[in-house]
Amino acid sequence: MAVTYELVKTCKQTGARAGIIHTPNGSFETPMFMPVGTLATVKAMSPEELKEIGAGIILSNTYHLFLRPGHDIVKEAGGLHKFMNWDQAILTDSGGFQVFSLSNLRKIKEEGVEFRSHLNGEKLFLSPEKATEIQNALGADIIMAFDECPPYPADYEYVKDSLERTTRWAKRCLDAHRNTDKQALFGIVQGGMYKDLRIESAKQLVDLDFPGYAIGGLSVGEEADIMYEVLEYTTPELPKDKARYLMGVGAPENLVEGVIRGIDMFDCVLPTRIARNGTVFTSKGKLVIRNAQYARDFQPIDSDCACYVCRNYTRAYIRHLIKCNEIFGMRLTTYHNLYYLINMMKQVRQAILEDRLGDFQKHFYAIRQ
Amino acid sequence: MAVTYELVKTCKQTGARAGIIHTPNGSFETPMFMPVGTLATVKAMSPEELKEIGAGIILSNTYHLFLRPGHDIVKEAGGLHKFMNWDQAILTDSGGFQVFSLSNLRKIKEEGVEFRSHLNGEKLFLSPEKATEIQNALGADIIMAFDECPPYPADYEYVKDSLERTTRWAKRCLDAHRNTDKQALFGIVQGGMYKDLRIESAKQLVDLDFPGYAIGGLSVGEEADIMYEVLEYTTPELPKDKARYLMGVGAPENLVEGVIRGIDMFDCVLPTRIARNGTVFTSKGKLVIRNAQYARDFQPIDSDCACYVCRNYTRAYIRHLIKCNEIFGMRLTTYHNLYYLINMMKQVRQAILEDRLGDFQKHFYAIRQ
């Protein structure tokens, strides 16, 4: 198998998992937050910096790379790893989410989705076969089934029809997948916020025996408590010997709660997007570094943080750079936010290994302001 | 003296100088191209990257730092070196050039210049004393006299009056300078494109015995041949034991020609500005990497270049990033362009040491397309 999940430890306090995921381009410890490199670059970061902060895997995007530069060019370059100079693991999203969130005038049929490019309005078509073909050309270690991410809220009948189509599409992705020895295709559980539908979706996908499973259709506008509840009844349906990936979730508290509910992998544009706007994570909560109160604040972003940024730069300097739209400001805030999440996940993993993730969770909330 | 110039070798073929400039924050070899860090950051670059490419000195800007974040904040941070995490030499421009090129509604009086901020229209005033006070607060190793950079073309009488005022202002800068043991104040030769006025300006400033001299008011729209001619009759007026700095010049051919005419230091925003727009230097001339012809070009920017960018990334990838306005694209083109110029200056220096800069110059033009 291209990708395997090794369970290292289950936390006695919480049931959370510490593991290792093995891929053709290296192994990484879980739980893990995966930085998002939408267009074959994690915005503002170099590959060396990503390694420095401990990102063993990054995510990239089928929809975006299909539009620019085109998967044929990436293939001709020798695949995504070589194209972007990244020799560790990569996961590509199937494009399903983007087709539903970014594109215009989409028309869902059994065959696939007709939509217009968000860039130039060009009429395009993605199907399970096409999304898999593109991902085979890109060559990521983990690729995703083409799914429909239903809106929130959505009525029961719509979600039921949608998840059943998603299962049929998942089957077609498996059939279309041409590179099973080097790329692992993960299925995506849907089913909205309906317990029986989530369980049904999970069962159908588990029957198809994917090497790993994602939970999609969360973090789409629902309250955090609803998301946690969905996780509570969904993850038990997934096999213990496969990786579990919660898509599109990146707020620190959501990561902690997700891990406690059995998740191994997360991704989200949030930490890099808010970084570029001048919002940074700290152990005490978020900090809007643009604010005037930091103009003469010569402390690091987070005194408890050991990252390159916190060792070398003050809030006053970073605020100045962000206020002036300087690229280096965005580099520093992005670096820090990614380091913060990846380092937090290391601490979470250590707590799992020591059967004290429940204590960690209490402390995590206690020091927030 | 805060800053000294050590003459190492004069090229027998051309008369060009190889030297070392010693500052309180380290020494650097000349001729040198100084990357411009207008707002206390060389756009898109980290301090570590600047060291990696061999930049022993960078430039920053009085006018811009006066406006944002304010020199008082930089002083409170412990000075510019500490504020921006740069422990090698810094030169600050006096703000004279920016007052004349960027600001609105400026009014030149003997006392100084009244102008409006290019950011918010605020009424401000800079004088020799104020520009020196700001530069003393910033704490750069080399600071510049506050001068007027006359427009081009400008008539003889205007330029004559202007250069005489610039000399009076230079004297006032010397008198106002409060930190002579740690910061060297350089004078700026003006005089437009008039031989007798350039010589007069140089003589007046040399009489004031500055620790180094700049040539200002060039690269303001005149033909390159005119600039070369001005250098030919101006540099001989400057003392051999002091550094000579040609302001605002950064095109590769201008650097080679400037060194041959006795210049030691250069600065310009050109290499970093064109980089962000997707134009890169190569040994064969400029290359507009945005162009469609590079979409499937899997060669490095310059096959003769040994920089981080050329060792790891293809034209196709960099084109893709620049087309998508990705920050990492601007990082790569900026890194390469600065490396190109600084490495070219190293080669120029080596040619001087081996008395063959004339041969270097011939080869430099021969391989350009």
Image (tube, coloured by chain):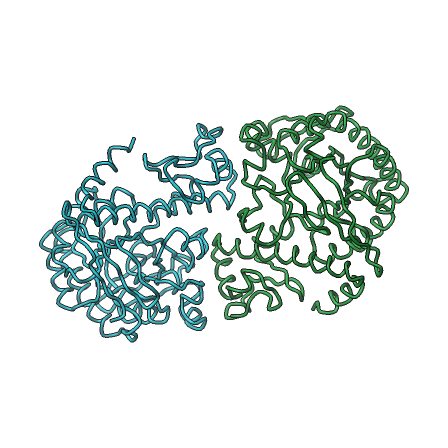
Chain colours: A cyan, B green
Q: Is residue B9 above or below residue A359?
A: below
Q: Is residue A117 above or below residue B204?
A: below
Q: Residue B195's spot in the image, x, y percent? A: 89, 45
Q: Nearer the viewer, residue A335 or A8?
A: A8
Q: Residue A232's spot in the image, x, y percent? A: 13, 49
Q: Total number of numbered labels?
A: 0
Tell whether B365 sits left or right of B239. left
Q: Nearer the viewer, residue B349 or A119?
A: B349
Which residue appears at 77% of the width and 54% of the height? Answer: B259
Which residue appears at 42% of the width and 46% of the height? Answer: A334
Quadrant location of residue A133? bottom left
Q: Residue A200's spot in the image, x, y percent? A: 10, 59
Give the position of the N terminus of chain B as an image quadrant.
top right
Quadrant location of residue A68? bottom left
Q: Residue A114's spot in the image, x, y percent? A: 30, 64
Which residue appears at 71% of the width and 46% of the height? Answer: B248
Residue positioned most to the top: B111
Q: Is residue B97 above or below residue A171?
A: above
Tell whether B216 sits left or right of B328. right
Quadrant location of residue B182? top right
Give the position of the C terminus of chain B as an image quadrant.
bottom right
Residue positioned most to the left: A196
Tell whether A263 sits left or right of B27. left
